[in-house]
Image: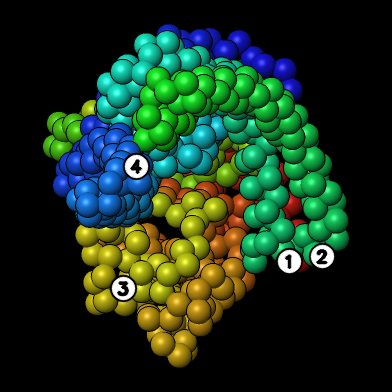
Amino acid sequence: MKPVAAPKNNVDKNMLGVFRYSRRAIELVWKTSPALTIGLAIATLIAGILPAAMAYVGQLIVDAVLAAIDIYKQEQVFHYQTALNYVVLEGILVLIIAASQRALTAQQAILQGLLGHKVNMLILEKAQTLTLSHFEDSEFYDKLVRARREASSRPLALVNKTFALLQNAISLSSFAVLLWHFSPWALILLVCGALPSFIAEAKFSGAAFLMFRWRSPEVRQQNYLETLLAREDHIKEVRLYQLGGRFLQRYADIFQKLFKESKRLILRRESWGFVLGVISTLVFYGAYGWIVSDTIIGAITLGQMTMYLLLFKQGQSAVSASLTAISGMYEDNLYLSNLYEYLEQETSSSITGLTTEPKPNDGIRFEQVSFQYPGSQTAALSGINLHIKPGQSLAIVGENGSGKTTLIKLLTRLYRPTQGRILLDGLDLTEWGEAALLKRVGVIFQDFVRYQLIVGENIGAGDNDRFQDESGWQKAAELGKATDFIDQLENGYKTQLGRWFKDGQELSGGQWQKIALARAFMREEADILVLDEPTAAMDAQAEASIFEHFQEHTKDKMAILISHRFSTVRLAHEIIVMEHGEIKERGTHEALLAQQGQYAHLFKLQAQGYR
């Protein structure tokens, strides 16, 4: 897959500031748990200082043993006891280092869980401030997928590498003091021996990140195919049309494409890592030979040789780990850019606003409203003018794609008009506070959600303030004509719906629609009720009963009905016929029949089906 300009520029920008997100990551971890962050710092400090102390004690042990061997027997007891004391001291240091490492591991594991939850909460909370257009934008959805995939673990990974860098810096400082007594050149060799590994890591970190960004669409396709092949609401049709083999093959093809790219990158990274690792090994063994030679000629003691070899080996590992940590921090910064790019997505200020209307009971007004979906070249709505007063009902008819549901999305402020404005009681919808506006609206979309919750909660979802109000459930169910089957369920309103969880019970399409209708009635304060194809899965008798009931209980409300069944829409005070995003006809049922236009034509076609 060829790289694109935008991600490349983004990577270049991050290369100029390896630590761009380090401060923010540390702040995020600190806010998650100050106590654990301090604990990490203390354990890191201990783990950084003690290795050098252990190496020095190791020298003292060897020298004490050699002294005890070389001197007269009467003095052996003293040096023997001294050597044993050093052994005990080294054992204590080993225990302290082991405890600090365990403390680091435990605290990191606990922080991982807490931080993962916190970041996921940030992502989900941000999602609640986004508009519907964000979720319908494939590029933005890729951004969301990238943020969720690894950003929950990367902040802690970045902080861990920061502490690891600090630990290694402390260790190297103590190593440097001891190695300086051997030769300043040893320090230079120490750094040079670790550079090749760093070069190998840094070279491929950016490439891995770019591959991660480019893959987002393919990964989403794989996830979607998994959903088709393993979800109960899709598997029926997949099995019926024998699509399983085709979708599995498509899934495998995407995997093979991604696997080839990953394999190529892995082989290149490991090959370069081996070649450059050979250089590091040669440098280390060169220093090894130098130290051994100095020991043979008597320039240093055997104990010093042991210490210097240990210091050089651990020092080289510390330098390599430090450089690798810096490389990893760069990579973590790249991944964290996905998270903060998502969290910093601009959103319209729709939460706060006015809560009182300048013209009470004026109703809903559409004034020259037009709308065009992002990226579309044609208008979904054009020049819509409407006025719905309290106590009036409006029916909307038209072919699929004529703009009926789009109009409802604008009314519920899921979208904002491209041109014109929508008023509720004299106040532009954009000026209403979101909570105050949405309390006045009850909606059933044709693709309503079938919550995998108990019956009562499925209904209670219509009013979050009364989500657990059992008396409210029953009242709403009566208004939605859902009590006829709820009362027959073994656990009534406590019955688990859907097949995702234990003892779940599936409903018919018509029963689900009655649950959705009850959900709309749950919002008692709502004076705007919108039903978008609410009875498509019901039989004619049930539909007639529902709408007779609906008319009776919405006399003082503004009701908007979208339906293809003319036996239903004929009861509305006004009917509009939409075509290509425009209102072509409007009037009562009788007036539209008299016009002999599109409505009359469609009505006659449908009436013939019942003869």
The three-letter code of the residue at mark 1 reads Lys
- Mark 4 and mark 3: Cα distance apart in space: 93 Å
- Callout in the foreground (4, 3): 4
Mark 2 = which residue?
Answer: 240
Tag 4–tag 2 contact (CB < 8 Å): no
The quadrant of the image that shows the C terminus is bottom right
Marks 1 & 2, CB-CB < 8 Å contact: yes
Instruction: Tell me the crowding category of disc 3: few under 14, some 14 to 19, or many 20 or more residues within 10 angstroms, Cα based.
Output: many
Q: CA distance from mark 1 to mark 2?
A: 6 Å
Amino acid type, mark 3: Trp
Q: Which residue is mark 3?
A: 473
Q: Residue at x 16, y 33 (%)?
A: 354
Residue 561 vs residue 602, the one in the foreground: 561
Residue 301 shows up from this direction? yes
Asked whether the beta carbons under mark 1 and mark 3 sit within 8 Å of each other, the answer is no
Q: Residue at x 50, y 56 (%)?
A: 448
On residue 70, the disc is: 4
The image shows residue 52 at horizontal and vertical percentages of: 30, 34
Q: Which mark is residue 236?
A: 1
As shown in the figure, which amino acid type bears the numbered disc 4? Answer: Asp
Q: Between label 3 and label 2, give the one nearer the viewer.
A: 2
For mark 1, give the secondary structure: helix
